[in-house]
Image (cartoon, grey):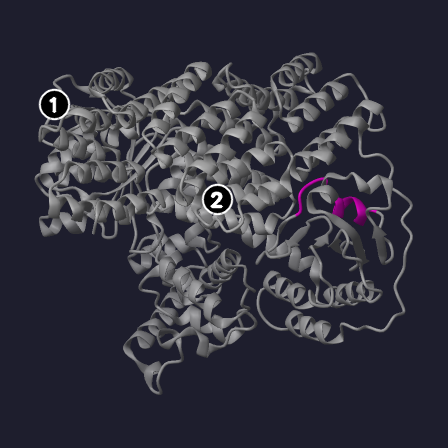
Amino acid sequence: MTLTTAEGLLLQGREQEALAAARRARRRDGGDAAGLLECQALAALGRGAEASAAVTRALRRGVGGDLEARLRALRARLLWEVGRRGAAREELAEARRRAVSPLAEGEVAATEGHFAWRVHDGDGALEALRRAEDALGRAQAGAERARVLAAQAAVLRDQGRLEEALGVLDRAAATGPGAVTTRVRVTRAGLLGALGRWDDARAALAGEEGPEARVVRAALTLSGGELAEANAVIEDALRAVESAGAPSRLLSEALLVASDVRLAAGDAAGALERAQEALRCGALLRDRETLCRSRVRGVHALLRLGRVGEAVREARRARKSAPESRGDLVALSELALGRSLIASAPAAAGRAFAAARAACGERPGFGHAARLGLALVAGAGREHPDVEACVAGLEAWGDRRVLSYCLADIRAADGPGPLPDLRGGGSSDADDGLAAFSLAAEILLGGGAWADRWTAAAHALSPALPWCRMAVVGPRSWELRRGSAAPGPLEEGDLALELAARCEAPLRVDLVAEPAWRRHPGRVLHGLGTALLAPIDGALTLYADLREGQGAAPASLPLVVQLARLMGRQGAPAAVERAEDDERAPFPGILGRCEAMRALFGRMRRVARWDDTVHIVGETGTGKEKVAHALHLASARAAGPYVAVNASSFADELFDSLMFGHVKGAFTGALADSPGHVGAAEGGTLFLDEVTDLSPRVQPKLLRFLETKEYVRVGESRPRRADVRIVTASNVPLEQCVARGDFRQDLVYRLERLTLELPPLRERGDDVVFLARHFLRQAAERVRAAVPVLTPEVEARLRRHPWPGNVRELLNLAGRLVLESGGGRLRVEDLGDALRAPRPGAAHGLRAAVQEFERRHIGGVLRHAGGNRTWAARALGISRQALVAKISRLGLAVL
């Protein structure tokens, strides 16, 4: 393996392979050049601490001249990334003194430009990067020169000089090797999108499949209104980026695009959650751009949720985060501030829109949106020439997402206006989709959850009726999007709601021809052309729409009418209400309807309000970490960090360093300060999972910390005061560990100030079927497949299974069933050996006999106690919670 091979792998973005090749070359030849490549590969992988240590080792070997200069320039960047800017500048000054060759001079100048760019000194950054370009050109280093040109383009983009930036990127693409131009093409696609040249932007990404390309592709797809495709692309990109583990600018960018997709799809709460994740990532990176953009995403989500006061505060924080040198961020934050103030403080909103217009530079979308805001503040209606001109400009720019938001502001300021006169009727044409409708009817009339049957029936009908969205509209409304595996609530103000309000007979509406609908935000975002509606009964309407340019066949409306009639005979109104109730969860990600779970939810609400230590006990797979995270989100610490740690990862000799942190130089390998888990969780929650795995040697240290809330970092003498809530978990009761001699009794007293006991799945009765349906929908959504429908026989098998792996085992089963079943109705044979019918005679086994005895005995005691569970629990010698769990598990009737 030669150095050339390792260098080529690094240029191709295959950092892990490049690292292995560089290490093999260093072991074989012992050359310092291989050591430099190793450091560069580690830095590219985001493993800054290891890269810094490798640089230190290389310098200690006594390298000199240009190689030392290049190593010191690299270490300067690493120091800068961890916030040690003074040390980084000192290291760079030393690198500048030792640089001799044009290559070293170019790398030093490029680092100077990077530092200037990060402190928003655009002119200083450009001057340094141009010196770097000149030096690298003399060194004939094509790859390094292309990277410097890409950096110049980034600075020009931040200054609003987009056309200049495109020209520089074209030079970079012509200068560097193919591996380097991959990133150049991705950056160029983003710039083309900002200029409204969407087709060119998509063409620039052709053939690019890396995580960075996927993030940009998702944003471009969203701009065209293709929500399902955008969601699939960004979720795939997030999985790839999150696998790296460490926060990065690419992760924050992926989270921001994911927030945009969620908001465009009507999931404002999910959009807010993604924006907050990006905000935390930006705080860790100390990146003002990410902080500003994350807050702006939060503003739009909060406005959609109706939380206007919070939106105003967040918009003002976003404006403070935007450096004055970044016109794009200033315009972005001012537009968000204007949107949040337009109803309550028009004058202040006008000032924000004016500031956005002045700062937008060459970004036409920002300019049109700012002028539109000014027109609305001045009281212009939707038919006003200024408003018409702004809307026309946004339409020409081509970002459907931004256009739909601007149109929503127009409708909010001007009112929805009168509905057009809708006339239409059923078609007498022959039903060419008989086969598709027959399959849909068979699924709808079968067994299983109503929401799953309706989803599967809608997908079965799609070959004959290529709908974009289908919805059940009424007092409680559901919507299913094409490519989605599960329905969700219909967003307030949706086009379907407005059309259904006047639907007394089957309707076919040309959305493009009707002026009142042509510029509706929903029509624009989704690119809709035709809407079809049919009453189900007096309360509900079935709605379906098709994309623009995809005209509805004459038989389309009769298909919708027949499906609506069938749904009416199936009791759709009650089914919609029941299905929505099923999906409500008092805590995000934790579902349950049995009495034991309702009792748990009630205790969680009370516990979340307090700040004492909480211990969660439950079998493996019951969801202890989800409960811990839910407590954090429901507490007053929700805005702070949540840090989860598995206690089994603590080696005795590393406990103090990992838990409480250390300072640079405290021990061999301590190359930088570390806050430790406690410092990282400051102001938030620290979750210690499997706390019983802590060794007896470190348990006293945890006990002292819990008693005093003070700790000392390794290498320091001054104690620090912690503002952290501790939540712990174990899969066995702590008293059981005390009895074995593995755990301190006094530590138990500290940990069990508040205790939550999670019931195992086998004791949660019908929750197993409820959760199975939910997990099947989730798994189908991820892979964009049809949702399998549970039959009564399969539900019975699920109830009887003991579930040793609890909810985690059920989750894994659902994922396998979606991949292997191909949709449709599940059979018992699909479940696998563990859940199939028992062998003959097995029903008379010990477990069945014990359950039958418990059922008869507990039922008799309950009847004798008149249904009073407290009295029955005392008579049985068990706790009331244990009795409730047994009633649920054994399927006893409620007295």
Graded by Cα atoms within 10 Å as few (under 14), some (14 to 19) or many (20 or more), the crowding at tag 1 reads: some
Residue drawn at the location 20% of the way across and 19% of the way down: 98
Dot 1: element: loop
Q: Residues within 10 Å of mark 2 (few under 14, many from 20)?
A: many
Nearer-N-terminus badge (2/1): 2
Residue furthest bottom in the image: 840
Residue for point 66% across, 12% down: 351
Q: Closest to the observer: 698 or 867?
A: 698
* Residue picked out by circle 2: 213
The reply to whether residue 259 is in sight is no
Instruction: Work out whether 55 lies above or below 177.
Output: above
Q: Which residues are magenta?
A: 490-501
User: Which amino acid type is shown beneath numbered disc 2?
Assistant: Ala
As measured in the structure, the alpha-carbon distance from the residue carrying label 2 to the one carrying label 1 is 43 Å
Give the residue number, with chain letter if any, for mark 1: 715
Of residues 350 and 103, the one drawn nearer to the viewer in this rendering: 103
Q: Quick check: 537 above or below 716? A: below
Q: Is residue 603 magenta?
A: no
Residue 496 in magenta stretch: yes
Figure quadrant of residue 718: top left
Q: Residue 761, image x and y in percent?
A: 38, 60
Query: Residue, x 22% and y 40% (percent of image)?
Result: 38
Q: Amino acid at mark 1?
A: Gly
Residue 468 position, x and y percent, is 69, 55
Left or right of residue 163, residue 6 in this image: left
Q: Nearer the viewer, residue 108 or 407?
A: 108
When asked about the image quadrant of residue 223, the answer is top right
Position of residue 496 in the picture relative to residue 702 (left or right): right
Where is residue 812 drawn, in percent x and y? 39, 62
